[in-house]
Image (cartoon, grey):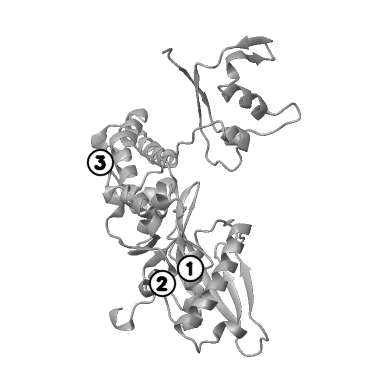
Amino acid sequence: MEPQIPSFFSTIDKVSKAYDGDPSSALLEALDPEQNSAFLDHYLDLPFDLSKVLFICTANSLDTVPKPLLDRMEIIRLHGYFLEEKLEIAKRHLIPGLISENGLSADRVEITDEILRKLIGSYSREAGVRSLKRSLDKVFRKIAYKVAKGDTGLIRVDPEALESFIGKPKFHSDRLYEETPPGVVTGLAWNTMGGSLIWIETVTLNLTTAKSAKLEITGKLGDVMKESTSIALTFSKNFVRKIQPDNAFFEKANLHMHFPEGGIPKDGPSAGCAIVTSFVSLALSRPVMPNLAMTGEISLTGLVLPVGGIREKLMAAKRSGIKTLILPLLNTRDFDELPDALKEGFRVHFASTYEDVFPIAFPPRSSL
């Protein structure tokens, strides 16, 4: 068997058409093993045998990669690091290298795990460690400057020194509420930058004069999320009628549902379970159990369907101090494959239908 020669294309999701051609058209032929044995380079006007070349492409998002090009690739998803992994990478690799690069010695600098955690959580929240390395580099450059100015003692990086070195924190807690009122629920979201909490707020505009129920939705939502909200409302009406036949809340209620951080686009079906809980919470006038977050697509009949990004969502929940999670039952395998350090500290419930979600989100008052 002849060895394959690797070739790399970085950030293939940035490939785009221009006035002088479309690079993806050439890549279609180059990556297709059925025809790349006689690939013709039109610039040199020479044929090349690319059949023994292993092409490795990277991308931050698959949304912009042309579908025909994506069909010719095997997709390998690389997960981001969670806090403990970043902490070890910083201590074992980043800090020793930066100390050497800045002409310092390890016995002249003291940077504790507490400061590293603050750097990771408040200054460089990302899937990888590139931003963390930049932040650490700023710290050590400032330390090198102090040494060059004649500082001969041990330099400790404490919270005050950290802010003087690299400025105020860029990120703050995802927790908008410590105690949620009726209608407010915590969901879990995932994007190319990692996981985050997504808050869902629902309030009533008028309960007495409306002739029919209306729903207004705000928060820069995509089409899939708007459809998910519509499905959630239909199911919520049926579910509330089922558990409280005399409850006529949805018949005349004008509702406004908002997803905070309105400048950030939001899409996907994974907030369906949380949206239903927001509607039900308002209809029953009961707040959701504290420190609870959930994810899962909801069907029109109340099935809780699997979603992606479980690892990243747990990272966001851990970062924000969430203690109880509701995940789809069909995501059990995804959860089981996670490192024990990431799963530690959570009470996790798996749901196959909304009937499983309701007693967790709204436990008997005596058990709170």
Please state, as top left, top right, bottom left or bottom right, where the C terminus lies in the image: bottom left
Residue at x 54% of width, y 74% of height? 202
Identify the mark nearer the N-term, 2 or 1. 1
Which image quadrant: the N terminus? Answer: top left
- Secondary structure under the numbered disc 1 in the rendered image: loop
Amino acid at pointer 1: Gly
Q: Residue at x 38, y 76 (%)?
A: 362
Q: Is residue 169 left or right of residue 31?
A: left
Q: Nearer the viewer, residue 302 or 296?
A: 302
Q: Position of residue 196 (x, y in %)?
A: 45, 56
* Residue type (three-letter) at the residue carrying disc 3: Leu
346 left or right of 251 in image = left
Q: Is residue 112 left or right of residue 131?
A: left
Give the camera-side residue of 225 and 68: 68
> Closer to us: mark 3 or mark 1?
1
Q: Which residue is mark 2?
A: 355
Q: Which mark, by number, is residue 154? A: 3
Query: Vertically, is 336 above or below 34?
Result: below
Residue at the image position 30 percent from the left and 33 percent from the top = 96
Asked whether the beta carbons under mark 2 and mark 1 sit within 8 Å of each other, the answer is yes
Kindly report the distance in space between the C-alpha atoms of the residues bearing marks 3 and 2: 59 Å
Secondary structure at numbered mark 3: loop
Disc 1 target residue:
302
Q: Earlier in the sequence, mark 3 or mark 2?
A: 3
Disc 2 to disc 1, C-alpha distance: 8 Å
- The answer to whether 104 is drawn above or below residue 36 in the figure is below
CA separation in Å, label 3 and label 1: 61 Å
Residue at (47% x, 77% y) in the render: 281
97 versus 313 height, above or below = above
Residue 301, horizontal then vertical, whole percent: 51, 68
* Residue type, label 2: Glu
Say which quarter of the image contains residue 214. bottom right
